[in-house]
């Protein structure tokens, strides 16, 4: 990625999108569309997707008992 001022990363991390895009335009001397594209690229670099290798949440089964209580069964496999 092109060299960007440190303020761009701070603005992105703190949710100041317009200031980040403005700083990108000024630093790179580019049009708005290009600056927005660079913003999105940097946003993804700063906010990576969760690791897909992490275990997926296990299913839950909720059941109301006769006495009115709620029973929660977690991580049940088929047939259990």
Image (spheres, grey):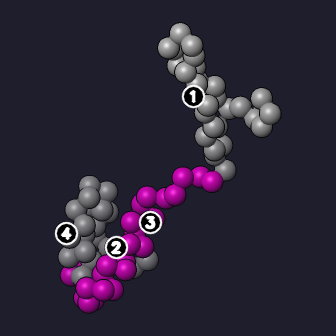
42 magenta-colored: yes
Q: Depth check: 11 or 28 in front?
A: 11
Left or right for 60, reference 15? right
Q: Residue at x 26, y 58 (%)?
A: 15
Image quarter of the N terminus: bottom left
Measured in 3D between alpha carbons, the distance from the residue under mark 3 to the one under mark 1, in whole angstroms, is: 37 Å
Label located before the other in sequence (4 or 3): 4
Name the residue beneath numbered marker 4: 19
Q: Of helix, strand and loop, which one carries label 3? A: helix
How far apart are labels 4 and 2 at the CA level?
Answer: 11 Å
Mark 2, residue position: 39
Q: Which residues are magenta?
A: 26-52
Crowding at mark 2 (Cα within 10 Å: few <14, some 14-19, many 20+): many
Judge depth for marks 3 and 1 and give the one in front: 1
Judging from the image, what secondary structure is the residue with disc 2 in?
A: helix
**Of the image marks 2 and 1, the number of the one nearer the N terminus:** 2
The numbered disc on residue 62 is 1
């Amino acid at each position: 990625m092109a060299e960007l001022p440190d303020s761009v990363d701070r603005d992105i991390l703190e949710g100041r999108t317009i200031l980040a895009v403005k700083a990108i335009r000024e630093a790179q001397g580019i049009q708005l569309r290009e600056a927005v594209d660079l913003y999105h690229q940097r946003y993804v670099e700063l906010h990576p997707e969760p690791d897909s290798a992490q275990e997926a949440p296990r299913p839950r089964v909720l059941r109301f008992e006769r006495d009115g209580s709620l029973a929660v069964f977690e991580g049940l496999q088929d047939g259990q």
